[in-house]
Structure formats: structure tokens, C-alpha cells
Amino acid sequence: MKKLLSATLAALIGMSSASVLAVNAAEAPGFVMADSDGDGEMSVQDATLIQKYLANLSNLENKGLLASDVDGDGDVMINDATHVQKLLVGLEDPNSLPSSESDASIKKKGSSAMNEFSAKLLKSSVRQGKNTFVSPLSVMYALAMTANGAKGKTLDEMEKTLGMNNYEMNRFFQAYPSYLRYEDSSYTDDFGGYHPADRFNIANSIWINNSENMPGVSKSFLQSSKDFYDAEITPLAFDDSAVSKINGWVNEKTDNMIPSIIDEIEPNALMYLINAISFEALWYEQYEDNQVKKLTFTDENGNTTRSDYLCSVEDLYIHDGDKAEGVVKYYQSFNYAFAALLPKEGTSLNSYVQSLTGERISEILGDVNRDYDVYTRIPKFKVKYGDTLNDNLISMGMSSAFDNSADFSRMLSNPNGFPLELKEVVHKTFIDLNEAGTRAAAVTAVIPNPGAAPDYEEPERKYIYLTRPFVYMIINLDTNTPIFIGTLEDLSSAIN
């Protein structure tokens, strides 16, 4: 009987102030593929080091680990040592090695892939008249970790859907925490005021069904999950107690914003893979009491809602050609920002969303204009969102992962007779935007006005009043990619 693989992915996101232009990383050097020991060249010692690593007699870290994946399949296994030996004696062509691209190249490729995935995920998730809020980062983290167990057509589809091959995914997500820059984002201003760091944490875990009738899980798959995703591995009985343990982990890692991801345990599931991201940040310029005013939001059916709006004049204007215009507002550390896009009058929100592409998102976020005073009205809102992403991912090209043609054999120590397929990819998110700042969370399952000067020319004004349905994002300004992306169509259900 076919076993079902259930995966759980948890993500919690937040925002902070930052330049909306991507910070270009210094060209970090790449590495020599098959140079496991990092001495600059391939030798028999590298094959030996791989063998010792597999026997738990030595360690491989960072680039040494990546260099040891000689066949580029996402795993370091004995066949990688064999490839090194064959390369040394001329039985294999060195040009067949996967590219040892620079860190900056992988970052650029991964960021582009994330913007494309963000557009596709939002388009497949938006529902007429309903609020939508998804975390592309969370979903991609979980699926990339899962992809280390896939082969054949299943892996090909996952790579195409995620926009990167298995090797590039592992490198991008292994490095992703370094793109967040939260460790040094605390600072003291010119007046001695202390500004705390954004709180942004990423955690991954795998919960393994240790029942006697379950097939063994591949050590190589688990090692890849640890090495590239720093995943916590926990075997446990899939009984009622497992629900509280898994949900307890989710609740902790999302700072109590998402208390649970599952209601009951699937006894036939092999494992739950979980990614959790939590974020909380203050606005760089917080709102005073006199900047909170009652305004009316009108949905696309003409229904109106009176609510509190945050009113300010900003200086970061964005636009999507003549299709939409919007504003960017910084969080305190300038590492993250909130961005909103208001479709032009007469264009439905769904129609605008369906026209979005990853390339357009990159262009919008990469072309910030400071030539205007942007008079902005942003509603206070709080949204809880949840959905099962099976149909979304199938429509994005991952069909075989959810049927009996799925090939997740690399997850198993002995794959014969135990085919796996994904049962569910469940996604939950949370956002609370108010005067102080923003808190946001997600879980997926796989389971400034200057004073006048003599020559000063007052800037042209732009008015971005979010008093009708709009698209919004929380952006990582280092990569210029959305961590969260959503739509607000029904303010009445999202009032604090």
C-alpha cells in the first residue's frame, strides 16, 4: 500500500525599515568543485575525506560540503567519492561537474527565482472578495528541503516550480540567514537613542514516524536537512501526543502568533517537514496619535467599512507602469520594508494580480523613486490566513508529487516497496499592522517633509490612499524579494 508523505512548513515573517534598493553583496569567491578539503585543488585526499565524512570519522562544513556533492544531486554519498576517483584518472570529464558558482551568483539567481515563485503563489491563492496572505519564503524553504528526497520527474517538476535546481536550492537556502542581517541591526542614533534589532528567526524541523511498520528514512536525506537547513530531527510515535509536540514547536518558533499547524496526526504519514519564520519590527518613523484618522474603505462590491488609518507623508514611490502605483515604508533597522501597490481605478484587484510576474516584481522593487512627497493612508489591519496548497502547487507544475507517480525514494534508506507521495502542503499565516510596527507569521505543511530652502522646489505630490483593495508585501531589502505577499480586499474582517 502506498505510504503518504505529509509535510509541514511553518513560516513567520515581519518587516523593518531599509533602503528599498537591494544591497549588492561583494563578489564572494566560489569554490573548486570536488575540492572537499578546501586546499584549492582536487586530489585523492578529497575522495578520502568524503569517505571519512560518510563514516562519521570527519566533518565537512560550508563550502567543503557543497564541493563534495560532485554529481550535484543534493546529497553527499559514496558515489561522490567514486566520481572524484574517476575524475582523477580521466574516466570522467571535469566539464561534467556542476557549476561552482560564486555566492553572489547563487544569491542573484535565488532572489530572481523567489520573485517568480511569489507571483505564481499569489496568483494561485487569491480569491475574489477574500483577503490573501502567503509567505513564499516559508513555502520554498519547506519544498526545497523536501526536494532533497525527490528523484526523476518529481524532482524535475519541483526544480522547475521553485526556479532552481536541487544544488542551487541547497546553496541559496543555506546562505539565506546571512541575507537577513538581523544580527547587527541594533544601533544608537545621533541623540543616544537605542534602536533594537528586528526579530527575525528561521527554524526547520523534521518529525519522523517511528512506528515499526514505517520504512527507514535515508541518513543522507536527514544529513542534507541538517547540513543545508539546520533542521531539528525528532523521531516520535504518531499518536495524539505528537499533535501537541508538533504544535508546541510551531507555537514557540512563531512567537505564539500561530499556535498550531495540525489538528490531528496522520498515522500513516512518514514524516512532517516544518519551516518556521518569526518576525517583529517597529516602524522607522512611528505614528503619533494625531496621525490616526477614521477613513472609509470600499471593496469591489461597493461595501464600505469605517476604520482607523495611519496617515503620513513618505518619500519612496513605486509604480508598475500605468497598471498600479504605491509606496514603500521602512522599518526601524532599514533591513526590511512594507510595500503596497494600488491598482489603477477601474482595474479589479484579481485582474491586476493575475498580470503580475516575477520580473515585474523585481522591476517594481528595484525602481524606487524619491522625487515625490507621497501622501499615504494605510489601514490598520490584522489578518489570519490558512489554505492547503496542493492545487496551487499542481497548477504551478508540481503535479506528480501528489499522485502515485511521485518519486521520493531518496528519503528512504530502502526505497523498494515503499513509494511515497505528498499528502498535503498546508499553509497558515498571520499579520498585525498598527501604529508601532508589524508582526507577521506563516506556517506551511509538506505538512520622510524637508524645510524650504531658497532654491527648493516643492516635490510633486503623489496620493496613495489605500481605501480600496490593494496588494502588499513585506520585503527583505538585501535581496529585494517578498518574504510575505498578500491582498487586502475585505477590511471589515481585518479590523484590529
Image: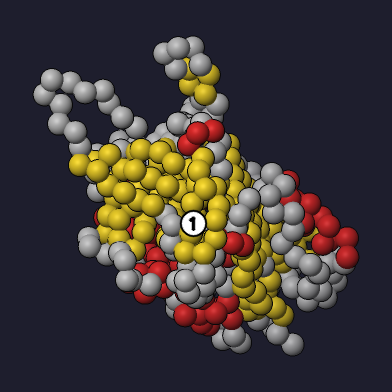
In the image, residue 30 lies at what x, y percent? 34, 44
Q: Which residue is mark 1?
A: 296
In the image, residue 197 lies at what x, y percent? 54, 29
| SS of the residue under disc 1 | strand
Q: Residue at x 20, y 42 (%)?
A: 460
Looking at this rendering, what residue extends furthest in the left direction?
Answer: 455
Q: Residue at x 34, y 63 (%)?
A: 343
The colour style of the image is secondary structure
- Seen in the image, is 273 located left or right of residue 371? right
Q: Assign the N terminus to one quadrant of the image.
A: bottom right
Viewer-side residue, 458 vs 229: 458
In the image, residue 132 lies at what x, y percent? 53, 65
**In the depicted structure, whether residue 176 falls above or below residue 357:** above
- Seen in the image, is 199 located left or right of residue 295? right
Is disc 1 surrounded by few (<14), some (14 to 19) or many (20+) residues within 10 Å?
Answer: some
**In the depicted structure, whether residue 33 falls above or below residue 426:** above
In terms of image quadrants, where is residue 349? bottom left
Q: Residue at x 27, y 47 (%)?
A: 462
- Seen in the image, is 438 located left or right of residue 31? right
Viewer-side residue, 241 vs 271: 241
- Is residue 161 among the parts visible in the rendering? no
Q: Residue at x 46, y 48 (%)?
A: 378
Count of all numbered marks drawn on residues in the image: 1
Viewer-side residue, 127 vs 347: 347
In the image, residue 419 lies at what x, y percent? 65, 81
**In the depicted structure, whether residue 314 falls above or below residue 269:** above
- Is residue 293 among the parts visible in the rendering? yes
Q: Tell me the amino acid under the disc marked 1.
A: Thr
